[in-house]
């Protein structure tokens, strides 16, 4: 406290001392004060020490700071450094490591030249130094000690200053970017922190379900009944293998029906197309404890089709088989089964002529297939084999066969790639591409579109091309209903006889019915391009939409 008062008195008497002094320590029982401007100079010198080479270019500011520094040193009683023996215990480095409170940072100009202060400096510096250009020994020793900052002495924690006691590393250099350079590889994925995929199945969702909350206080394990079964299985789901339909197998009709086929000529089936027959069939199913129901009975595939809302089981087929047996005359052959798919195979290089030089027939070829080594395969022929001669003068042909099969095509696979002997020749069995052919509309009897997609304004009769259905031909066709006023009168056609008159084809415009196999369109039923070209040729000169 006394030192602070004496400094204030000296400042009033005109001596160049700072107005405020900080307490540095004690010297001989008295407090030693230090000028705050020393802190500014120490900060400036410390930052300059971090640059190599450097120049301290302050001009008048440098002179003022150095003057203030020397005045502070000479005004303070540092008797321990006035002797040469005590000089090693004090250096400028120790002053630089002292705690300061400066906030202003002087300007540092890196350059390889150290400029001394100009000789024109005036003030108390001239009084203590004989030559301004030459620093005193104490200051020179302090500057020499500044170079030995690599191993500074221990500094108490209370005396350390943030940013002064450690060197600041230079900023890292940025890599230069090359124009049009390829980007580097992507960063590797950390599998430890990579999120797991979300489950997509019921079993996976059930495994990640939250645990059940605890029961209320009044409901313990002794009050609860047996837990209900889970709504869905919690284990892994069992999925059936995916079976793809082979390329030589058709999709076939819907299996939500039961087909009844008859061997030979079918009997009278009129009584099956009534409501009483449907009720009788459902009564048999109900008595057999079956959930299946028959919704309708229609004619299909030269037999009956019992339409059902679901696929019939083997037990349902047994019940319906009993119903058909009791509804038909005794001894009538029939078969009850679900509709099957159709597989297509072909037999290559079959002789077109038999041993007698005659053309082979479908009956003879079918008999040979049933007696061959692959009889178990050809026992399921859905139609008679079709013979296709390779050319007009060829002695061989290709035989196409349609076989009732399952969706996996298991039956023809037994014979595919195997040889078969026909007319003393070894022939190869290969799969045939499934061709559904060009559809024939049952409404307008034109080729090229199905019945459900027909755009004709009115339906027509396939026999006479009249504007009525085929079953109404006898009542509405002029050729069959007769003409009593004609001379001589024309009697009507009897009901039990077919129409004896010539038909009219809407496709080739010849004297036969539109669904007759003698029409040339039937010979090209698998050639859509030929049918479309024939339509363009036969309709030349006719207005659009005319027949």
Image (cartoon, rainbow, N blue to C red):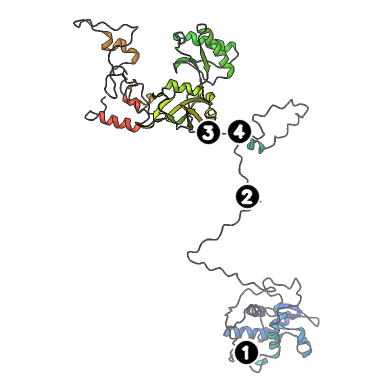
**Residue wearing tag 3:** 244
Mark 2 element type:
loop
Residue situated furthest front in the rendering: 356
**Residue wearing tag 2:** 194
Labelled pair 4, 3 in contact (Cβ < 8 Å):
no
Q: Real-space Cα distance between discs 2 and 4?
A: 29 Å
Circle 2 packing at 10 Å, graded few (<14), some (14-19), many (20+), is: few
Circle 3 packing at 10 Å, graded few (<14), some (14-19), many (20+), is: few
Mark 3 element type:
loop
Q: Real-space Cα distance between discs 2 and 3?
A: 37 Å
Q: Picture coordinates of residue 91 (x, y %)?
A: 73, 83
Query: Which of marks 3 and 2 precedes in the sequence?
Result: 2
Task: Determine if residue 380 is in view.
Answer: no
Residue situated furthest left in the rendering: 487
94 relative position to 502: left or right: right
Which is nearer the eye, 159 or 498? 498
Q: Residue drawn at (25%, 7%), measured in percent from left and top?
A: 482
**Mark 2 or 4: the one toward you:** 4
**Residue wearing tag 4:** 239
Mark 4 element type:
loop
526 relative position to 173: left or right: left
Q: Real-space Cα distance between discs 4 and 3?
A: 15 Å
């Amino acid at each position: 406290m006394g030192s602070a008062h004496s400094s204030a008195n000296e400042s009033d008497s005109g001596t160049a001392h700072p107005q405020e002094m900080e307490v540095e320590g004690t010297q001989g029982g008295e407090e030693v004060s230090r000028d705050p401007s020393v802190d500014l100079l120490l900060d400036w010198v410390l930052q300059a020490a971090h640059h190599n080479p450097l120049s301290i270019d302050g001009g008048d500011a440098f002179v003022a700071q150095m003057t203030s520094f020397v005045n502070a040193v000479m005004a303070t009683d540092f008797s321990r450094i006035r002797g040469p023996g005590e000089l090693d215990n004090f250096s400028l480095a120790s002053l630089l490591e002292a705690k300061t409170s400066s906030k202003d940072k002087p300007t540092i100009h890196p350059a390889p030249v150290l400029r001394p202060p100009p000789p024109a400096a005036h003030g108390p510096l001239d009084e203590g130094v004989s030559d301004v250009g030459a620093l005193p020994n104490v200051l020179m020793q302090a500057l020499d000690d500044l170079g030995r900052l690599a191993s500074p002495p221990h500094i108490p924690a209370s005396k350390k200053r943030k940013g002064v006691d450690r060197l600041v590393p230079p900023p890292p250099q940025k890599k230069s970017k090359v124009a049009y350079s390829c980007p580097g590889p992507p960063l590797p994925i950390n599998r430890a922190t990579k999120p797991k995929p979300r489950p997509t199945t019921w079993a996976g969702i059930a495994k990640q379900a939250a645990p059940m909350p605890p029961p209320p206080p009044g409901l313990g394990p002794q009050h609860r009944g047996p837990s209900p079964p889970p709504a869905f299985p919690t284990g892994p789901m069992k999925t059936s293998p995916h079976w793809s339909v082979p390329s030589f197998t058709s999709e076939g009709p819907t299996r939500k029906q039961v087909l009844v086929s008859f061997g030979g000529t079918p009997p009278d089936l009129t009584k099956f197309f009534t409501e009483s027959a449907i009720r009788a069939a459902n009564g048999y199913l109900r008595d057999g404890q079956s959930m299946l129901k028959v919704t309708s009975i229609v004619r299909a595939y030269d037999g009956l089709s019992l339409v059902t809302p679901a696929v019939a089981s083997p037990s349902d087929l047994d019940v319906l088989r009993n119903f058909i047996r009791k509804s038909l005359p005794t001894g009538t052959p029939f078969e009850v089964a679900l509709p099957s798919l159709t597989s297509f195979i072909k037999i290559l290089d079959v002789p077109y002529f038999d041993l007698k030089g005659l053309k082979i027939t479908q009956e003879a070829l079918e008999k040979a297939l049933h007696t061959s080594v692959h009889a178990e395969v050809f026992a399921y022929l859905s139609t008679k084999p079709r013979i296709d001669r390779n050319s007009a003068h060829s002695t061989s042909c290709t035989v196409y066969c349609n076989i009732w099969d399952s969706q996996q095509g298991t039956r023809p696979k037994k014979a595919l790639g195997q040889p078969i002997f026909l007319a003393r020749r070894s022939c190869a069995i290969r799969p045939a591409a499934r061709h559904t052919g060009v559809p024939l509309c049952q409404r307008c009897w034109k080729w090229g579109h199905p019945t459900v997609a027909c755009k004709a304004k009115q339906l027509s009769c396939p026999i006479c091309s009249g504007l009525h259905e085929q079953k109404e031909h006898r009542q509405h066709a002029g050729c069959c209903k007769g003409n009593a006023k004609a001379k001589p009168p024309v009697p009507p056609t009897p009901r039990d006889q077919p129409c004896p008159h010539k038909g009219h084809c809407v496709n080739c415009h010849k004297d036969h019915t539109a669904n007759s196999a003698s029409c040339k369109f039937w010979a090209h039923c698998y050639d859509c391009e030929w049918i479309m070209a024939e339509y363009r040729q036969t309709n030349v000169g006719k207005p659009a939409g005319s027949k």
